[in-house]
Amino acid sequence: MNSRSPDALTIDAGRVRRSFERAAASYDGAALLQREIGARMLERLDYVKLAPRTILDAGTGTGNALAALAQRYPKADLIALDIAQAMLRRARGDSRWLARLLRRGPRTAFVCADAQRLPFAPSVLDFIWSNLTLQWCGDLPRLFADWHGSLRVEGLVMFSTFGPDTLKELRSAFASVDAHTHVSRFIDMHDIGDMLVHAGFADPVMDMEVVTLTYDRMDGLMRDLKAIGAHNATAGRARGLTGKAHWQRLSAAYEKFRRDGKLPATFEVVYGHAWKPQPRTTAEGHAILRFVK
């Protein structure tokens, strides 16, 4: 495949799974940004009126959000879903002390599945939570349609993902040394909002913030990305080994971004939430009229 073809940025789901399988042991030690974004998502729930019976954590990873969700919604059943079995094993291990602490009993289920193809019956979930998973999903319109079908009426979806300026320095540095794809395509928040509406969600709320991490050397950034499983999963990636001379050129290209003695790594963090509204038509297409007393 030509790396400049439109399909070069297609996400290889098998590579995503393998990358996160390998990163399960190192993930928590490097996932500082992921935990911080999850904490900021939790703060947003302070302004949402919700009493869910069943919560799905789509892309749970090592289960960092499970304790906070369980404490916030102690009556809800939790489903922790991830594409990588090794991630789920770590999440399951961490959940045992949580169950004892909250005396919840066996009310957290662990499901190994693709977040783009939920293995659930229609209308069984009240709340879908997803922290930094959407950027690994190649077909967001299909994903949102699937999530919409799995939610009960008046159910909520809340997520975070990365926007187009994410890792712009790394993308630029790689573009100066070869023609392969090295950084995923990240979707603009306005396009994501349109996808939510098209899938049937109502009143999507989208916003964005820029977070910049700094490093002494580019090697530090690459080690962190590897430790959390953020490998290049694009179809247009280079297939051979990268030589020392290539990495030296890449490091030199990244140096042009150095400011105040540090190398920046930009992350455009996108937050969104939307509700599944009452249906306006029947399955046959007839309008539904509601009368308020």
Image (cartoon, rainbow, N blue to C red):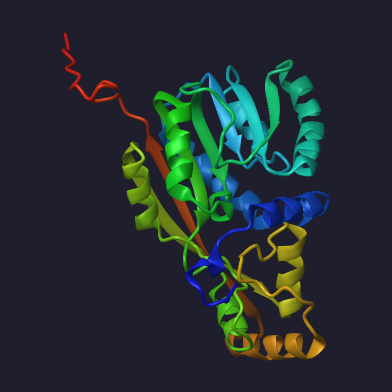
Q: Is residue 218 left or right of residue 162?
A: right
Q: Residue placed at 50% from the left, 22% from the top?
A: 52
Does residue 133 appear in the picture of this structure? yes
Count all numbered tags in the image, as a single digit. 0
- Name, please, the residue furthest toward the front: 1
List x then y, in percent, for residue 238.
69, 75
**Which quarter of the image is occupied by the N terminus?**
bottom right
In the displayed structure, 154 sits above or below 179; it is: above
List x then y, in percent, for residue 280.
23, 25
- Determine which quarter of the picture holds residue 26: bottom right
- Determine which quarter of the picture holds residue 181: bottom right
- Name, please, the residue furthest toward the top: 293
List x then y, in percent, for residue 82.
67, 40
In the displayed structure, 138 sits above or below 215; it is: above
Q: Is residue 241 left or right of residue 109?
A: right
Q: Residue placed at 77% from the left, 60% from the top?
A: 227
Does residue 259 appear in the picture of this structure? no
In the displayed structure, 83 sits above or below 224; it is: above
- Determine which quarter of the picture holds residue 94: top right
List x then y, in percent, for residue 254.
64, 85
| Viewer-closest of 220 and 57 | 57
**Which quarter of the image is occupied by the C terminus?**
top left
| Viewer-closest of 33 and 43 | 33
Q: Residue placed at 58% from the left, 17% from the top?
A: 75
